[in-house]
Amino acid sequence: MELPLDLAEERFDWRRFAAVAALAVALQALVFGLVFTHLWYHVHDVTDIAIYHEYASWMADGAQPYRDFAIEYPPLAVPLMRAVGHTYDITAYTRWFSFEMFLFTLATAMVVAAAAVRLWPRDRRAYFAVALFAAAVAATGAIIENRYDVAVALVVAAVIGLLLTRQITLAAFVLGIGFALKLTPVALLPLVLLFVFHRPRRVVLATLAFAFSAVLPFVPYLLMSPAGVEHVFLYHLDRPLQIESVLGTPLLVGKALGLIPVAVGYGYGSHYIEAGSAHLLAALSGPLTVLAVAVTYALIWRRRETIVGDLRHVPLVVFALTVAIMVFGKVFSPQYVIWLLPALALVAVKDRLLGALGFAVLLLTQVEFPSLYGRLVGLKPGVLMLVSVRNAVFVATFAVALWRLASLPPTAAIPELPANGSLRTRANRL
């Protein structure tokens, strides 16, 4: 049986990290350069890059986002769109945006490598983790080049790495950046605060760090156009039940079996379900998501001594929370699975069942999107059942993640090395 270590006190092996990171870079180059160029669909099928290019073109002409045109993305997404340049050449813009996302994927792989070296400083599992991350990127598919969600994955990976070194204030600051990128990372803030909840000053400092990085990017646009910034939040609150959502699964199955009349509408940048109960299911999405996150946090709170005392559980906890954020959302766009990649790669090293379920979600998502998306919108029974199976696997992933949290021991035995040099253990209590 492995004894838990205080990973934050372990000396970081930079030489080992260099070797693991080199493997991570090589594998990502292989995935982008070989795998993504030999897929059964075109790399830029069903892309959002055209939307980003349009916004970037308007900004290049002097228009201000939020004030002069409505934009549904939080403010830190704006520089990602503008940084590409080539605003008058969609072909060049697409090529350079894909390269930008490749760089973000490399950065995420490097952070995963650092976390893996921290988690497994003395065996080959660190190499296995970066190989799994590369496999997860390949399983996700070329959508990683067509959306900016890998920037959110980088935030998640950084939070994991910072928690492993107990840099709580910095982790909260990074989460604030995630909020200004995609809003949803705010759900991880209570987890970060859990590590210092018994020290009120540290809680206040971490909360202020989050608030600073989360709010500051909004301030210039709030001063220009409060209504434009409000649109970012109302846009997502008002969205209907998206066709790929888990809550829409009963309607998809009913339509595939010829039992329920279902139609498809388009709005808010995606296709949504039009059916008698679709509005009710969309309304239930918020309470169910809050419940899913609350149940996950209840299990985390019950096992807080173990989680804070044995940092090797951090990837599992982050993975469970990320799934909880997504599983009952009224929108489950294919790019959302990118958020799972860092935690999934680290969890799958030791948990074969949870890893297999997570990879199945990635693969089934790529099988459906983008090559079969037209058939999904056409409500073809085979694709409806494929998406329904993917959603069932995702619910099973959530259930197993909760089971793993509930199965953690109530306390963590932390090795101490007393003055006489003999190894003993103690229960780490807060």
Image: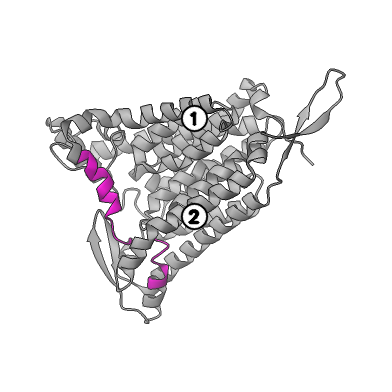
391 or 57, which lies in front? 391
Q: In the image, is 143 to the left or to the right of 430?
A: left
In the rendering, which numbered label is found on residue 292?
2
Q: In the image, is 407 to the left or to the right of 91?
A: right
Does residue 233 sit above or below 87 in this rendering? below
Q: Quadrant of the N terminus?
A: top right
In which quarter of the view is residue 316 placed?
Answer: top right
Identify the amino acid type marked 2.
Ala
* Helix, strand or loop status at disc 2: helix
Residue 183 rendering spot, x and y as whole percentages: 36, 41
Q: Quadrant of the C terminus?
A: top right
Does residue 210 sit above or below 242 in this rendering? above
Q: Which residue is mark 1?
A: 171
Q: Can residue 141 be seen from the camera position used here?
A: no
Q: Can residue 312 be seen from the camera position used here?
A: yes
Residue occupying the point 60% across, 49% down = 299
Q: CA distance from mark 2 to mark 1?
A: 23 Å
In magenta stretch: residue 292 = no
Crowd band around label 2 with a 10 angstrom C-alpha radius: few (<14), some (14–19), many (20+) = many
Residue occupying the point 34% across, 44% down = 147
